[in-house]
Image: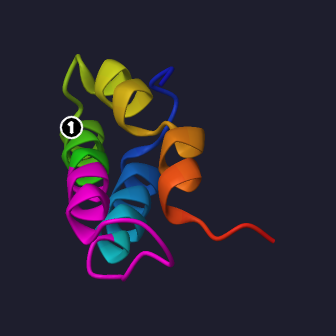
Amino acid sequence: TKGELSKDEATKLLAALKSLSPAKPSKGEEASWKEKTAALVLAGEKLEKGDADAGAAVKAAANCKACHDVHREKK
């Protein structure tokens, strides 16, 4: 969110984010999973392009707790 990634790091992050979407969530609704992962991919694309609002997009989309609460099985 601070804009400190290199172009290469942003490209690698985007690839990792894109790999999440086709995965199946261990719990929760698949539509919710698709919505959350699509927002992450969009934010990653902004990062890779160097968009001025990329940091805000990442901050909004990368709320780990919100996703884990809905889609991650409890241990």
Residue 61 location (% of width, % of height): 36, 36
- The structure residue drawn at horizontal position 48% and vertical position 72%, both measured from the top left corner, is 27
**Residue under the point 42% across and 75% down:** 25
Give whichever of 62, 67 is nearer the camera: 67
- Residue at x 22%, y 17% (from the top left corner): 52
Q: What residue does disc 1 label?
A: 46
Helix, strand or loop at label 1? It is helix
Q: Is residue 71 above or below residue 67?
A: below
Residue 15, percent from left and from top = 34, 69
User: Bounds of the magenta span?
Assistant: 21-38
Counting from the top left corner in percent of width and height, residue 20 is at: 37, 71
Q: How many numbered marks appear? A: 1
Looking at numbered disc 1 in the image, what kind of residue is underneath it? Lys
15 relative to 14, above or below = below
Position of residue 17 in the picture relative to residue 50 (left or right): right
> Can you say whether 27 is above or below 67 in the image?
below
